[in-house]
Image (cartoon, rainbow, N blue to C red):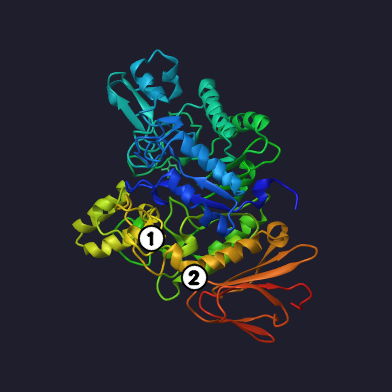
Amino acid sequence: MAGKWWQQAVIYQIYPKSFQDSNHDGIGDIQGIIQRLEHIADLGINTIWLNPIYTSPQVDNGYDVSDYTAIDPVFGTMTDVEQLIQAAHDRGIRVIFDFVLNHTSNQHIWFQKALEEPASDYHDYYVWQETPGGGKPNNWGSFFGGSVWEYVPSLGKSYFHLFAKEMPDLNWQNPQVREEMFQIAAFWAGKGVDGFRLDAFIHIAKADFSKQMSGEETYPIAEPYYANLPAVKVYLSEWIGRLKAHFPELFFLGEAASADATLAEEYCDPEADLCDAVISFRYFPEKEPTIRADLPKQFLPKSLDWQAFKKTMAQWQQADIYPVLYWNNHDLPRAISRFGDTGKWRERSQMMLAGLMYLQRGLPLLYYGEEIAMQQLVMLEITAFQEEAARDFLREGQEKGYDEQQLLEWASLTSKDASRGAMQWENTDYAGFSETAPWSGVNQEPDFTAASQQNRVTAFYRQLLKLKQTELFIAGNWEMIDTGELPLFGYRRKTKRQDAIVLANHSAETIEYSASLAEASILLANTADFQIKRDHIIVPPFGMIVFKTKGVEK
Ligand code: BGC
């Protein structure tokens, strides 16, 4: 199985604040990750991705970087990081760092200088418009609410921020910025980092500021003017090209939130020096909220539109790229709470989701905790939510007379804050994460810890990832199996020599599916409750099964 190393990668995303606290301040840290590398290696993981650990005022949990080449003391020291890279490499695990290239913190020395010395080179590191009197150059909205423009009265100018106002956007038109970003990435590659997850890279180019979005809203999201503009690829390929010239093995995993499969093909064009793979947020088409309430839909539970999801997966599987296979990350509610079952079928539905997704063609990307069927945090107070939009939802709901417990339950099921809970290691205080209350809160669930799931969901993940590492599931073709209206997701993987079928029941119903698989051997199943007859299979609730089918009549 030749190819690039990352084509055989199985990535495990660690949210460092929530993984393991070694110094008992309630916040996870680098030494904590080192302590837990064995758990990761045991699973069959060969690559980890860490959310940002650079020095940061933590306005956006580290995505507001104030020093790119220093480690935030809350996580440890440079020596700790060097030790982590070494310890991971010793176990055959590669390390991917988050790379925040669209913006810095307003506490970064560049921005401080940009403010204090407007005549200095640093001023042009950021995106400014003359706005005497504080008017807005346009109506474009920030992803974190309000305008993208923040007025600085002492300068008579406004700077651009796509995210929080404490996170000013960098000016990638400026060659000095591009040079700085090259130096920073080269610094980390020199330390042995194997790749970068490129945070929000699709936003590094902006349109002409005279353009206005139409519509009712005061500050609408203005994607056409600040996402996926042609210059993104120009800047990116210069940057990646230079890095690859020095570090040919570096892996670039782009976060392309709004990319469909066609755009992903452009961002992963092997002829250009662009991304190797991209993470899109367009995988999961949801139905209208299951609850009728005059409240922002974002925080009302919704189910997956499975028929639309099948079509989306087929597009990504058939695209000329190496798709990223994931259900979870720190910006999304955990899939088990979102689309699975957190009651009777919790373990089984977690295994079903994993089997369905990761045996497809592409790069599995797991999020810490899914291997123990960790669910969304149960958040009991409005103040537990960091995300402003979630707080607004809760306040609005209260004003409209909704029951507070009900509102908290909805927000817990849907918010990104609740997906960042402390890892549940064992059945002790704070789930073995820390000796102090975790910053995030923690679910105390004796049956859902790394210790108690060793021979259950975790064991299934081990088998699954082992199977995923075989030639058929790395290199085989992918073909959707038409299961009509049945709540069954099915596909076939095929090489010249081998052939397998994956079937996953994504409902709590028992399904009868017509297929002649009695002669086929079972490679993996998440339950023994399947009944395989001569011409049909009885698929139990949330059952997932993989058959080796070469030579079997279909
Ligand atoms: C990260 C978010 C972050 C944002 C700004 C993203 O896409 O995943 O967590 O808030 O970029 O850096």
Placement of 366 over or under 49, stated as above or below: below
Q: Residue at x 34, y 66 (%)?
A: 291
Residue drawn at the location 40% of the way across and 73% of the way down: 343
Q: Quadrant of residue 164?
A: top left
Residue 221 vertical position relative to residue 289 in the rendered view, above or below: above
Q: Which quadrant of the frame does ligand 1 lie within?
A: top left
- Where, by quadrant of the figure, is residue 484 drawn? bottom right
Mark 1 closeness class: few <14, some 14–19, many ≥20 residues within 10 Å: many
Quadrant in which the C terminus is drawn? bottom right
Asked if ligand 1 lies within 8 A of label 2, the reply is: no
The image quadrant that residue 151 belongs to is top left
Instruction: Please name whichever residue, 366 or 219, is drawn nearer the observer in this view of the structure.
Output: 366
Q: How many marks?
A: 2
Residue pointed to by mark 2? 349
Mark 2 element type:
helix
Give the number of the disc on residue 376: 1
User: Could you tell whether 226 is left or right of 239 in the image?
Assistant: left
The amino acid marked with disc number 2 is: Ser
Q: Which label belongs to residue 200?
A: none
* SS of the residue under disc 1: loop
